[in-house]
Structure formats: structure tokens, C-alpha cells
Amino acid sequence: MTIGKTLSKVKEVISTWGHNSKVLALTEIFWSLPMSWVYFYRPIFLRNLGLTNVEIGLIFSTLSFYNVVLPFFGSILASKLGKKRAFMLCDSVGWTLALINWIISKSFIHVMIAISFEGLIWTTASVWETLLVEDTKPEFRASVYSFVSLMYTIGSLATPVAGILIGLFGVDFGNRILLSIALLSLIIMFILRWTLLHEGKERLNNERGMKVHANLKEYEKAIQMILHSKPLLIILITSILGSVYYIATSDYLPLFLVDEKGLNLTASLASVIPLLSSSITLLLLLFYVSKLRNKEQHLLALTIGYASGFVSYFLLVTFTRNSLFVAFLFSIFNGLYSSVSFSVSRTFLNNEIDEIDSDARISILSIVAISTNMANVLTPMLLGFLYSLDPRFPFFLVVIAMLINLFLVQSIKK
């Protein structure tokens, strides 16, 4: 396929999206490119500051705690201020102050302050997701989520660029450069989104919307909807277990790659692993995930994804001892999982919400986010403790979580 035909196909796909879907997805690169670098090197940066594995776990457990408490206020803010204003205020203020504090951080206290501002962002995470998909038809939402995932994948593909900066300037100053790049990039994104975003299709400033989303009883209603819907309940459980993968991968995999008891790579060479995984993810997002249209296709993709995630971490904990070949196999299977873990599961979730009550979208998404983080408040600390015992131990939990999710997805199909 020529470049011209590829661009024409991309334009055709984007034309099926609503206005806000286009704005949020197309500006996502300003966040995903620098933040994929920041997230990959952040655990190594924290270790360089002199923090222990347990302290690193405490930091991310604190972030999970904020993610439990603050989303309760997301729908209320959206009903009072409007979805666009509520989302943009929390997102722009939270990220700006968080990154400034990360740039100047020198101690555990500085990092905790940065994490507190980062927690503010999650207040309106469900509002962001509502704006992202509400004005796009269900059959085209997989392509929206695929594009968002694609943007983060592109950032991961460029991680070796960050590795070069780390190699040139060292872990400490190199990370502060990455954080500064992220701050400048996000400022550009905020300006574009403040200018281009609309309030949204599912408005909250009518009588029903104010009543629904400003009243905490709606959370009780949302919980009942989840409990009485097998697909929603299973997606909730898979999200909770999936966060074990996310925490282990984002907080401890980078450490494992450079740990002498793990792969023992240099900090710059470690960036090759996400490059390989992201290459697989990129291909699948472009040529497979974006073409998924119905429930059966989504469930098949999730089955393949969770099976691949299980294989990837089984290989890592079973055979890896300074083995680049196993790391290569891990990257391939992990790329398969990454291509569906966010895009397909969130598409499936939002489409199921449409079948029940689209007006309850923010409340249900908030419950999913709150439940996931509530169940995993202590997970980062637990994984930090396990890592201190043996670097492979946190990833044994990922293997178990993937296997359970695989069986759960199969049960939806029955």
C-alpha cells in the first residue's frame, strides 16, 4: 500500500468520528509522545534519587488512593461546570503543576507533592472518555480507541530517542530534560483543546442531566447496572486485574530490565524493549484492531490479547536470566496484548453502556475507575515488597491475572 493510499484510508476512518473524538484523538500525540518516555524512565529516575522499592511502591499506592477518591467528584464537576470546562481545568492544572514539581524534585517529599497534583488529573478521567466517544457511532469507536493507543505506541517506538538523552546526560539530568519536553508539549495540547473542544453531545446542563450527575445516588444506580449486566461486571473485574499488569509493567519492568538480577541492560539499551513491543502493537492497531466492528470480533480480540499477555510474562518469569532472546519473545507477545488491552476493552465497555443507558456513561465509567483503583491501592507497595525479595515475583502475579482474565472473557461468549 502506497503512502497516498494509506493517508486516504486514515482520512476515511477519521471522517467517521465525531468532532470531539477528532480533537482529542488527534491532539493525543502531544501527551503520548513525551509521557511514554517519562513513564518508562520514571522508576529508574526514582531509584536514582535514592528511593527504595517499597518507597517507590508507596508513591504509586498514594496515586492509586487519589484515583479512588477524586473520581467521585468528576461527574459533579461536569454537571456544574460543563464537561469541557471541568475536564480541561483538572487536566491542565493537574499536569502543569505535577510536571513542574517532577522537574525540580530532589527528595521523597517533592515526589509526593508531584504525585498529589497528578492525582487531580484523574478527577475527570471518565469525563475525558465520555467526550472521546459519545459523538461517535458504536461501530466506529474501536478505531477511535485504536488511534489513541496508536499515539502512545508511536511514543514508545521513539523511546530510544529518550534513551539517547539519558545516555548523553545521565539518569538525573536526562529525566529532567524529558519532563521539561513533556511540559512544553502538554501546554501546546491544552491550548488546542481549550480552543477546539465542544461541550459534547450528551449534555449535562439540562434538568435530567443536573439531577442524574450531581446526585451521588446515581453512583448507586450505576453499581446496580453493573451488577445486573454480566458483560459489564466481567469487564470491571478484568480492569481490576489488568491494573496489576499496568502497575507491574510501568513501575517495575523498567527496573527489571536494568537490574543485575534481571536482564541487566544499560538504561539506554533498555529502551529497545518497548520499541520492539510497540512495533507489533502499531501493526495490529493499524491493520486489525481498527477494523473490529461487532461484539463477537471484540471478544475474539480480547481472547487473543489475554492469551498473549499470559505467554509474554510466563516467558519472562520462567526463562529470563540475562536472555535477550527471551526478551525479544516477550516483546512480541506483549505487543499483541498491548494492541487490544485498552482499545478493545474500552470499546466493548462503552458499547455495552449504550445498550443499557448512555446517560449513565460518566457514572459507570467513574465506578469502573474507582473500583479498579480501590482494589489496587496497596498493589504498588505489595509489588515493591515482592520485587525486593526477587525481581521476578511481581510478574508472577501478572501471569495469574492474565490467566483469570482469559477465562472471564471466555465466559462472556457462553
Image: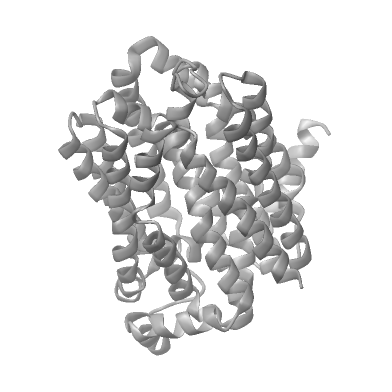
Camera-side residue of 39 and 125: 39
Q: Which residue lies furthest to the front in this view?
A: 389
Camera-side residue of 235 and 222: 235
Camera-side residue of 359 and 363: 363
Q: Identify the residue at horizontal 75%, vertical 69% (top origin).
A: 413
394 vs 355, left or right, is left
Q: Residue 37, position in %: x, y?
A: 44, 31
Q: Residue 49, position in %: x, y?
A: 24, 26
Q: In this view, does 361 lie above or below 106?
A: below
- The answer, for residue 312, to whether it is visible in the render is yes
Q: Residue furthest top?
A: 168
303 vs 323, left or right, is right
Q: In this view, does 391 lie above or below 302?
A: above
Q: Residue 116, position in %: x, y?
A: 23, 50
Specify the quadrant that holds the N terminus: top right
251 vs 235, left or right, is left
Q: Residue 259, position in %: x, y?
A: 43, 22
Specify the quadrant that holds the C terminus: bottom right
Q: In which quarter of the image is residue 199?
A: bottom left
Q: Identify the residue at horizontal 52%, vertical 40% (top origin).
A: 395
Q: Is residue 219 above or below residue 273?
A: below
Callout count: 0
Colouring rule applied to residues: one colour
- The answer, for residue 17, to whether it is visible in the render is no
Q: In which quarter of the image is residue 88?
A: bottom left
